[in-house]
Each structure stands twice: as structure tokens, then as C-alpha cells.
Amino acid sequence: MQIFLPIAEVSVNAFTLIGLGGLVGVMSGLFGVGGGFLITPLLFFIGIPPAIAVATGANQVVASSVSGVLAHMRRKTVDFRMGGVLLAGGLVGSALGVLVFNLLQRVGQVELVVQLCYVVFLGLIGAMMLQESIRALRRARHATGRRRLHQHNWVHRLPLKMKFRASGLYISVIPPALVGVAVGVLAAIMGVGGGFIMVPAMIYLLGMPTKVVVGTSLFQITFVTAFTTLMHAVNYNTVDVMLAVLLIVGGVVGAQIGTTLGARLRAEQLRILLALLVLAVCFKLALDLFLTPDDLFSISTRVR
Amino acid sequence: MRALALILALGLPGVAGAQDSGSTMPADPQGGLLPPVAAPGQWPLFPDPGLPRSGQAPDPVEAPEQVVAGLSDSSVAITTSFDGSDILIYGAVRRETPIPEGSLDVIVTIEAPSQPLTVWQKSRRAGIWVNTDRVEIGAAPSFYAVATTGPLDQILSPDWDNRYRISLPLVMRGFEGAPEVEDSVPFTEALIRLRQQNGHYRLDEGAVTLVEDTLFRTDIRLPANLLEGDYRARIFLLREGQVIDAYSAAIEVRKVGLERWLYVLAFEQPLLYGLMSLAVAVVAGWGASAAFRKMRRA
């Protein structure tokens, strides 16, 4: 069933979009990532202009993360205080990111910067997560004595300390706020929620327990992507609500399936799966950058 | 969709007779529903500024053969389920004298409103492929189709092509802004090639059927990814590579219904539109969450 998107001004198959949303929704519920890092490149691929793909991707992430965060709130696995600090940073980052995005679009390097960001971030994080979770699996197998709750590092020596009860942490607010800013910038530039950055950062940098990480990151993502969507809609008219609705229909259902699945799988297995997925997307994007493109030329119509 | 079949006039005696008795349409082209054929020299045949056209259009008083034509649709409505539209363009050659010697040819073009765009070229920098060079095109039609009765290079002389800018490379020429690269030809060629690949620029040689050197018709498919605006159909009558008469008509392409409403809202009330998009997302997320909880309890 073909459907004409009013803002993107392209005609696409409605079922393709619903399926795409569904796939990404499962990821969202399973790993606590918004799935934006999959949906934005996929939207490029089916011919949605980059500016619209990014803005609408952010809107879709709002829906899937609302759905996910509600499920986590019922299980009491959201650290609201930590979420609030991350969010404050996130809003600043998002405002910055929307400006940078427009600048990049003017000089024609959006796709390059987006792809480079993906390759670098996904590569680093994927490798880190894979290494860590394989080690964790081994440790579980040859159960070697008692482990410390979390490692103490430079993060714990910064000022402005605050108690985060749900996470069982007493740390400075500076690192979480900075993580929030970084995630906000990425949300605006890449149309992603930033969960794939935030989840590892919370586990390895802040030392939060895995149990509350997913719910808290979804909480922050919901608000940051909502703000990003609004910024894109008001400044550049690039949110296509028709496209968003189709992605959302698939996405919200997928998110619920993902959350249910996630409760049944072991945390270490989940992390290996996410690490492999992140590395796969990274590899695919890196190939596009390094291999000679099919056509050296491309057309971009000017921003309205 | 309003299907307006407009037959203006058929000047050939036999055909015209049948028309007069069977149709309520006026036989006089000046009194038809379509805009009348404009006087030469002020033809709005090509909508956008380019190089000034050399030469004058042929004088219709002296032209022994004239084209009269109609379109199956004078407007195209973009609805939610819009996936392209076929436009039938048909007409006849009016002449007072017997059919002259030599072959008669017809060229039909449809073009979309123009928009500014940038053509980028990638090159390898530090191992990765980067957009490095660009050419800004001030205005290029987002859709352009040419249908002919025969091979374009055989039925149209370069001189007349220049005058009316019928073939694709010539449509592009005159639209180029000041290029930032030394040789902008590969860029315009790439633009044409890319748009031909996705079907937005088309050359259908032989797609116009001409019967008895008098009646002609062709179908031109408008793609699904259509931009709004006033499209223009042009019909050229040719003999020995020379344009002996031309005709143009407008096709209005508009979004309607929900499409129109959302588009207008997005551009005129962006904050409201943004909040609406968010509300849709939040309600959908919450609704799915609530629905699944109920399902699990049941």
C-alpha cells in the first residue's frame, strides 16, 4: 500500500515503514536503546531526505521510549534523580545539536559527519561492550570469589557529589550532566535517542547497576527526543507526522514485545547481543565510507 | 480527480464535421476551456529565467499547419494514497491546405516547477569518501519528460532545440549559477543521469503516436514523488527538424485533504504541529503500554 508523505514529499510503502518501526521497537524494549541509530540510516536508504529522516526519527523515538519507560516505571527500575541530571544536560546538548545540524547541512557534510559519528561511537562502544560482557560470562562460569560493587576511578574524585539512591551511588553530578549533553547533541544531529552511548556510559563510566540503566536511559531519551522533535519542527519544518505515525504503530508494539523478551534473557547475554548489533551497524557504515561509491555524484535540494 | 476531457478543435474537414455534430465543445480554439494559444514572442513556454531566447516563434498566420491539443487532466490531486498519475495528451494538426510533402513529427514535453539544488561530487580524502566539489544549480525542474514520434536527434535540429530548449541537456543549460569548479559539465550530466535513473527525467522516443499525419496522442506518467506546483505541457509540431507550431497548457498539481492540511499546519503553525506530533507519539506509546498490560493480565 503506497502512501504519500506530506512533508517528505515522497511516496513509500506503508507496510515497509510499519515493519521497520516494529523491528526498531523490539530493540528499544530489549536493550533500552531508542533504536534511532538503526531507523535513521534505514530511512535514508528508502529515500527519505536526511533532514526529514533525522527529525522524524527523533519523533518516533519519543513514542517507543514512552512505551518502554512506562514498563520500567512499573518495575521500579528508573532512577529519577539520575534521569533528571542527565536530562538537564540533554536539553542543552539538543539545542546545540540542532544548530550544528543546520550548519552542516549548509556546507553539505551532514551525511559524512553523521556516518563518521556512527562509525567512531558504535565501533568504540561495541568493542568495549563485547570485551566486557565476554569477560563477565567467563567470570560467571568459573565463579571466582566476591566482586566489588563497582570500580572506583577518577569519576568519584570530582566535586558536587550527590546521592542517587535508586542506583546506590554517591558521585559528582558533572559526569552524568556531561553524558547528558553529549547524548543531546547526538539526538539532534543523528536523530537518535543516544541510548547506545548512554547505556554503556552509565554502566562503565558512572558505575550504575545494569538493572536501573535501561529504565533511566529511556526516561532521559523520552524528554530529550521530544525537545529535539519540537526544535526541528519549529526551526526547519522537517518533522513528517505521517511518516512518524507509521513508524510509531510498528514501534510501540515492538517495544512491548522487546521488554517482555528482555525480562526473560540474562543481562550478560543481552549485552553481547547489543554489542554484536552495534558492531554490525558500525561495520556496514564504515564500508560505505571506505569503499568507492557507486556514483560519485549526488543531488541535494536546498533547505527550505 | 477531475477528469476533464477537453477537445478544442479538429480542423481537418472530415474530423471537424464529426466533432461539430457530436460535441458541445466549442470548435474554436480561442473559445476553449484551455488558455488560448498565445501570440508569438510572448510565449511563456519556459517558465524560468535563462539565457534570452534567440529568434522568434513562428508566425501562426503564416504557419500552414497548427497544433490543437487537449489533456486528460488539467489538474492532479495529491491524496494520501497518491502513487503517480497518467496524463493523456492528445490533439490534431489543423491545416487549410493539403498535407505537405515530407514527414511530420510531434514532440510533447511536461515539466515540473523548478527548484534550486546542489550537485556534489565525492572524492577520497584521507581514505574516506567526502563531498568535496559542488555546483549550485539555480533552478532545475524536479520532473521533465519528453515524448516524441521518433529519435530526437533526427526530428529536431540543434538550432531549434536551442531556441525552445527541448532536450534535457538544453533544459539544464542556462540554469547554472556561477560554478565553483572549472568544468561544470560533469555535474549537469550527473544531475541528468541521476534523475533519469530514478525516472524523474525521461526521454521516450517513439512514445507519441501520430495517425495520418493529423491525429496524435501520448501518455506521460507522472511519478509518485511529485512536487506541488504548476506543471506545464508543451507540444511542438515539426517538419524537417524545424518547429512549425507550438502549444502549451498548464497542469495544476496540488496536495488535497489531509496532505494539504498537514503541510499547511507544518509550515504556518510549526509549534502547534510539533506539539501535535509529540502528542501522537506519547499517546501511542502510552496506549500500547496500557494495552499490553491488559493483555498480559487477561
Image (cartoon, coloured by chain):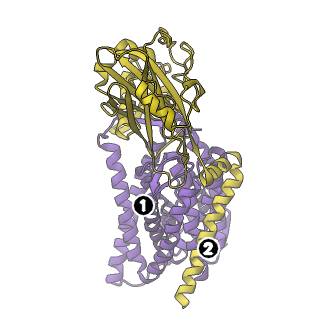
- The amino acid beneath tag 1 is Thr
Q: Residue A191, how many percent across, how many down? A: 53, 54
Residue A225's image quarter?
bottom right
Q: Quadrant of the N terminus of chain A?
A: bottom left
**Chain of the residue under the numbered disc 2 shown in the image:** B
Q: Quadrant of the C terminus of chain A?
A: top right
Work out whether residue A169 can be spotted: no
Colour applied to chain A? purple
Q: Which chain identifier belongs to the yellow chain?
A: B
Residues B106 and B279: in front is: B106
Residues A123 and A103: in front is: A103
Q: Residues within 10 Å of mark 1 (few under 14, many from 20)?
A: some
Residue A16: mark: 1
- The amino acid beneath tag 2 is Trp
Where A12 sits versus A108, above or below?
A: below
User: Which residue does the image show at 35% across and 49% down from the upper left?
Assistant: A286
**Chain of the residue under the numbered disc 1 shown in the image:** A
Q: Which residue is mark 2?
A: B286
